[in-house]
Every structure is written in C-alpha cells, then in structure tokens.
Image: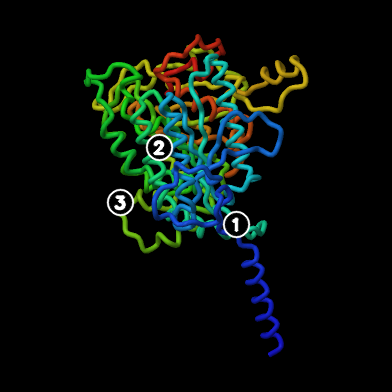
C-alpha cells in the first residue's frame, strides 16, 4: 500500500514538473499579450505591435526584421502586428525591394534571444552587405519577416524531445491557419510589383507550415509556367512575371514525401523554358536524425492500417521528403575550391523520354564560392580578413541526371526529369549540415545568402558590373 502511494506521489510530482516546464503561449513582439483577431484593422495606428528587431549585441543593424506571431491553432495574436508588417512589405515591394520571410521550426520561438532569430537577422544583414557590393547604388531595400509560433512547448532539456509529434500536429494547424493569409497578401504585392522579390524560408516544422500554406499555389504556378514553344516571353525577366514568390526554401523539412508526390509528378510530366526559375527548393542533410530516424519511427505505427495503390507509397508516407531517395533531385557537397567552369558546367545527360528532351547545354553543376557571403566576426586586420576570405569553402550543387552523379548522398539514384524542373529536392552531406538544427553554420549561411542573391538577380541587370569572383553563384547563372 505504501509503495503504491509513493508511486502515485512520484507520478504527480513528475506531472507537475512537466506542466511547470511548459513554454508560455504568448507573443513576444506585440503591445498586448493576446488581442482579438476580429474587428477593424488598426494598421494605420502608431503602436508597438510591429517593431523591428533590435539585436542585443553591438552588430550592424540596417535591415528591419519584423514579426508576425501565431497561437497553437494558427490564429493571429494581434492583427495589427500582421497588418503593419504587410504594409511595410508593400512599401518595400513598391520600390522593387526584397522581402524574405523565415518560419522557424521545432524547439524555437520568437523570443528576443532565440538563436534562429539572431541568425536570421545576421543572414539578412549579410544579404544587405553583399548586395551593396554587387550593386553599389543599393537600389533594393530589404525587409525580413520572422514568423513566430510555439515551436518550443517544453522548456526541459532532453525531455523536450518527446514533443516532436505533438509539435508536428501543431505545425499542421498553424500552416492551415492565418499564415496562409500572410503569405497570400505578401504574394499579392509581389505580383503587383514585378520588379520586387519575395523569398519564403522554413526550417523543420516551420518548413511544414510554409509548405502547407503554399502547396496549392505551387501546383498552380507550375501549371501556369510557359512552355518552350510559348513565344510570348523570351527572357528571364518576363518568363517569371506573375510569380507569387521568387523562391520557397525548406531546410530539413519535417513532412512526408507523400505530400510532394502530386507536385513532383506534374512537374516531371512537362517541359519548361531553359530560363525557368525554381518555385520550391528543399534542402535536407543526411545527418538530420530528427527527420531521418525519429520521423519514420513515428510514422511506422500510424501507417500500419493504411492502404496504398502500389508498393512505393508506404515508404513515401513513412519517410520525410528529404530522405525518400527516389525524390532526390540534387546533391550538395562541400569542397576546397571550385573547378574550372568547363568542368563545373559539363553537359547534362540526355533525357530518356523524348517528351522531356531539352538542349544538352544546361549546366548540371553550379559552384558557390563567393567569399563576400561568408558570415564572420570582423577581422582585426586587413591581412586577417584576406586570409579568412581565402579559406572560404566551396559548395557544389549537382543534378542527379545519371547513376553516380549524386553518390555522396543517394548512392546510384538518378532522376529522369527536365533540367529546368522548378522543384528541387536537395540532399547534403554531413559536413555541410551536421544535424537537424545546424542550418546557420558559416558554410550553409554563405550558401543560402548566395542562393537568395542568385535567384533575386536572375534576369535583372545589376546597377553596376558585378565584381569578378571565380565561379561565384551570382556570376555562374543559370543554375542547374
């Protein structure tokens, strides 16, 4: 009897400890703790509901990062916060500026000291710094938007790992909620101002939120993409007019490969102009244990009673999209330096299907090695800065056109797909991202900055000549 009572007491203490360790459900950047999402907009009012992020450390800060925050059901905490952020984005778009939205993932939130927020601001500052070098007149204003939700629901180290599936369910609810409204309003301003740029980035469950919000728009965008024989548009500046966004990047995305199946199937079934830009880019590390190990383990039990039309979909349902090898389209690897352009831009393999045949001049590889994009603390001397720039590693992006092209991440897998297919499912080696959360290391940071800049500048002449950089991403377009 005493033993049973002691066990009950321990269970109660454990339950109370878990409850006390729960993260607060609250916004971090609004004037009111929780306000109604109904009623008239207050976007024109002067208030503290939509402040720019102010980094605690003494770092460069001439890029505004604003916030839009949601509860566990995808409801806005404060509509004025969103309205003011969208109005700021509209002003930036009207000047042909760049709006970059980042949705954080598991174990993160919008706290002032959250590492994702600090790193996102640093990345935006780096984009601004590099862009000034590329275009000295600095003709594009840059705005960052940080989408906050309760990705960290438990504040107890180690034990917070048990929240993986509970937060996955929450991420789905958030993605189906008011985030769609935010993305759609931003996209409307992108369409209204064709010279502006809109980039959406999501990590982990934040990638799932982003994908859930834009998946139908991705299908629509692919349907609307012009065919090679469409003579109404002839260059990159017109072929991508009407785009709702310029790039959606999902890093270590935590959702099933099954969700990508209809998009990839349609994208592979048609042809594109050879200056087609990607609509969706997914990047997953081989070393990501959360989506590589935990994800399929949890999906296995839930898939036992499912019925599938063939053998493949069972694996699609259990595997995260970046770990389902048949869907991998590119390999991303680190190497000491870029090869010569002749090696980097080797001819692509001929498509097996005549319906997908494309000119065999599309580069199958692009090397990213621009030292200006590597984020470091300021060097003490010019010599130290030069030495640091010389040590910048290169990152090689390779299409999986033939067996062995992507052997570092997908063995002998290859994909018969149009070279300009607007969906990229990239898999990386461990040295580029060592685990699920290693998305802001200097090399990955540099690659993301170069990727954003290369997409932003594709088809848009710079205000001044781009400084020479050996095989740099900005100079090496078109991308594979």
- x, y (%) of residue 111? 61, 48
Give yes or no for contact between labels 3 and 1 (Cβ–Cβ under 8 Å): no
Q: Residue 160's quadrant in the figure?
A: bottom right
Quadrant where the image shows the C terminus:
top left
How far apart are labels 1 and 2 at the CA level? 34 Å
Q: Earlier in the sequence, mark 3 or mark 1?
A: 1
Q: Residue at x 64, y 27 (%)?
A: 375
Which of marks 2 and 1 precedes in the sequence? Answer: 1
Q: Nearer the viewer, mark 2 or mark 3?
A: 2
| Left/right of residue 458 with respect to residue 69 in the rendered view | left
Residue closer to the observer: 32 or 348: 32
Q: Residue 263: tell me if it is visible.
A: yes
Identified at 58% across, 31% down, the residue is 123
Mark 2: few, some, or many residues within 10 Å (few <14, many ≥20)? many
Q: Residue sitting at 35 percent across and 19 percent down?
A: 237
Residue 252 or 104: which is nearer the viewer?
104
Looking at the rendering, which quadrant does residue 401 occupy?
top left
Classify 218 as above or below 276: below
Instruction: Classify mark 1: helix, strand or loop.
Output: helix
Say if mark 2 contacts mark 3, CB within 8 Å.
Answer: no
Q: Position of residue 21 (x, y in %)?
A: 64, 63
Left or right of 121: which side holds 391? Answer: right
Q: Which mark is residue 310?
A: 3
Cα–Cα gap, marks 3 and 1: 34 Å
Dot 2 corresponds to which residue? 186
Q: Is residue 379 above or below residue 145?
A: above
Label 3 element class:
loop
Residue 161 circle label: 1
């Amino acid at each position: 009897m005493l033993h049973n009572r002691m066990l009950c007491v321990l269970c109660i203490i454990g339950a109370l400890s878990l409850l006390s360790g729960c993260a607060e459900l609250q916004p971090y950047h609004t004037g009111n703790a929780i306000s109604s999402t109904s009623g008239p907009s207050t976007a024109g009012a002067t208030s503290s509901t939509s402040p720019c992020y102010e980094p605690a450390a003494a770092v460069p800060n001439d890029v505004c990062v604003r916030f839009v925050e949601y509860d566990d059901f995808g409801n806005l905490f404060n509509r004025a916060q969103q309205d003011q952020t969208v109005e700021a984005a509209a002003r930036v778009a009207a000047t042909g500026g760049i709006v970059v939205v980042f949705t954080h993932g598991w174990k993160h939130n919008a706290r002032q000291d959250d590492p994702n927020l600090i790193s996102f601001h640093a990345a935006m500052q780096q984009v601004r710094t590099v862009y000034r070098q590329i275009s000295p007149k600095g003709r594009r204003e840059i705005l960052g938007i940080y989408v906050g939700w309760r990705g960290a629901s438990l504040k107890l180290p180690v034990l917070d790992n048990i929240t993986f599936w509970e937060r996955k369910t929450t991420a789905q609810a958030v993605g189906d909620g008011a985030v769609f409204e935010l993305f759609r309003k931003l996209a409307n301003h992108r369409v209204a101002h064709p010279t502006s740029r809109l980039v959406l980035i999501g990590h982990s469950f934040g990638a799932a939120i982003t994908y859930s919000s834009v998946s139908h728009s991705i299908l629509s965008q692919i349907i609307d993409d012009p065919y090679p024989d469409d003579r109404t548009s002839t260059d990159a500046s017109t072929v991508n007019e009407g785009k709702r966004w310029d790039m959606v990047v999902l890093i270590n995305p935590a959702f099933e490969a099954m969700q990508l199946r209809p998009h990839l199937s349609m994208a592979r079934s048609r042809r594109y102009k050879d200056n087609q830009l990607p609509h969706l880019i997914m990047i997953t590390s081989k070393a990501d244990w959360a989506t590589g190990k935990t994800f399929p383990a949890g999906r296995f039990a839930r898939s036992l009673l499912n019925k599938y039309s063939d053998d493949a979909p069972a694996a699609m349902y259990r595997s995260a999209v970046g770990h389902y090898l048949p869907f991998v389209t590119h390999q991303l690897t680190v190497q000491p330096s870029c090869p010569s352009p002749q090696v980097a831009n080797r001819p692509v393999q001929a498509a097996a299907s005549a319906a997908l045949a494309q000119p065999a001049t599309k580069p199958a590889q692009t090397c990213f090695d621009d030292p200006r994009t590597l984020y470091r603390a300021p060097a003490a001397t010019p010599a130290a800065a030069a030495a640091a720039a010389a040590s910048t590693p290169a990152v090689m992006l390779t299409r999986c056109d033939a067996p062995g092209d992507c052997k570092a991440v997908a063995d002998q897998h290859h994909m018969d797909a149009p070279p300009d297919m607007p969906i990229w499912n990239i898999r990386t080696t461990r040295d580029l991202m060592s685990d699920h959360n290693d998305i802001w290391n200097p090399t990955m940071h540099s690659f993301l900055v170069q990727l954003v800049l290369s997409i932003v500048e594709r088809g848009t002449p710079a205000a001044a000549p781009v400084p020479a950089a050996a095989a740099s991403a900005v100079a090496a377009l078109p991308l594979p």
